[in-house]
Amino acid sequence: MVPPPLKQSCPCMKEVLNHGNMEFVELLRSEFQQKQLRKTDLNADNSTVRRVSKNYLERLGDPGDIPATTPRAAVVACSDARVPVLELFQQEPNHLFEVKLEGNIASTECLGSISYAVEHLPAIEGVVVLGHTGCGAVTAAVDQYLNPRPDTTPADSTIRSLIRSITPSVEIAASALSSNPDLLEGRFLRESLDRTRLIDTSIFVNAAAMAWKIQEFVKRLSRVIPVWYGVYDLASCRILHVDLEHRDGSLLFGLGDAPEVIDLNDVAKCLSLYLKKMNTFDAARFAGNGHNQKTEEVWEKLSGRSETSNMIQKTKSHTESPREKIQRKLQ
Ligand SMILES: [Zn+2]
C-alpha cells in the first residue's frame, strides 16, 4: 500500500491553538496591568483559570451527564505544573486530549495514547508536542550527560529510564554547540560545553525530536494527521519554534511543523545562526551545525531505541524516495 501524503494540510486547528496562545499572553498582560493599577493581588474572579472554568457545564454537561469526548487536538506536554495546557492555548474542557509525561517524551505508553486518539477520536485534527523552557527532565539529562553517575537507588534507575529517552536529543545539541566556534571555546569536550546553552538547546531539540518520532508513528496509522511542535517559554508564556522556511536563524511565535529527518540539519544551522545573533536571549535556544556523522549516529540511536519499529509495519512495496531511504535507515 502506498503511504498517504507525509503532511496533510490542516492549518485550521493549528491556527486556533496559535491564536489561543496569543490571546493567553494578552490576557496575562492585561491582568498584570490591572494589578499594577490596583496595587493589589489578582482577584480570583478575574483569573484566566476561572475564565475557562465557566465553560465546564457547557462542555461537560450538567451534573450526572456523561458527555461524548470531542477533543480537536492531542497534546503531548511535560508534567511540569507550570505548563497549563488548556489555559495556555485558551481551550475549553473536552477540546484537548492531553498526554503529560516528564520531558514530553514519546514513550511506548505515549504512542499508545496517540494511537487511541487518532484511531478512535475522529474530531482530532493534529498532534502537538510541547516542550518548555526550564524543563527539569531535560536539565537532568544534560547533567547526566555532562557528569555521568551510576544508579544508587531504585528511584535512580526509574528516573534514568526517563533520562535515557532524552539523551539522544542532548547528544544532538552537544554536537551542534561543540562544532560552532562562535559558541564554544576550544575543541569538543564535555567539560567545555556551556551547561545553560546546552539545556536551552536540548529543550528545543527534544521537542522537535519527539514530534518527529510521533510523526513517523502516526504515518502508519489508519488516519494520517499532522504533528506540530513548539516550546512554551515560561517567562513570556509564548510558544516558539524554529523558522525552517527562511532558515535565517530566527525563532517564530506559535507551533511549527514536526521536522523531517532531513530538516534537522537545517534546523541546526538555523539555530547556530540564531545563537550568534542573540547572545543574551533568555528564552530557549536551539543551535547546530550541518549534516554530519555524529548527527546521523544519534538519530540512529534514537530510532533504534524506540519501540516504534516494533509497533509499525514497514512498507517496501514501491520505489523508495530519498526520504524513505533515510527513514528506513533510521528504523
Ligand atoms: Zn519539563
Image (cartoon, rainbow, N blue to C red):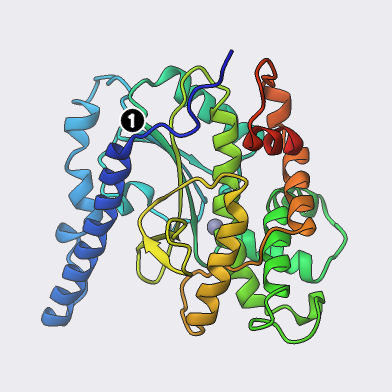
Vertical position of residue 200 compared to residue 261: above or below: below
Q: Position of residue 217 (x, y in %)?
A: 59, 30
Query: What count of labels does the image hold?
Result: 1
Nearest the viewer among 92 and 203 is 203
Q: Is residue 155 visible?
A: no
Q: Secondary structure at mark 1?
A: loop
Nearest the viewer among 135 and 129 is 129
**Quarter of image, res 317:** top right
Which residue: 73% across, 61% down? Answer: 171
Q: Position of residue 263 (x, y in %)?
A: 57, 51
Q: Quadrant of the C terminus?
A: top right
Vertical position of residue 105 compared to residue 122: above or below: below
Q: Residues within 10 Å of mark 1 (few under 14, many from 20)?
A: many
**Amino acid identity at mark 1:** Pro
Horizontal side of residue 234 vs 215, given as left or right: left
**Quarter of image, res 190:** bottom right
Indicate the quadrant of ligand 1 in the picture: bottom right
Q: Position of residue 71 (x, y in %)?
A: 33, 30
Q: Quadrant of the N terminus?
A: top right
Q: Which residue is mark 1?
A: 71
Which residue: 44% across, 60% down? Answer: 243
Which residue: 67% across, 19% down? Answer: 315
Q: Position of residue 105 (x, y in %)?
A: 60, 46
Vertical position of residue 213 compared to residue 44: above or below: above
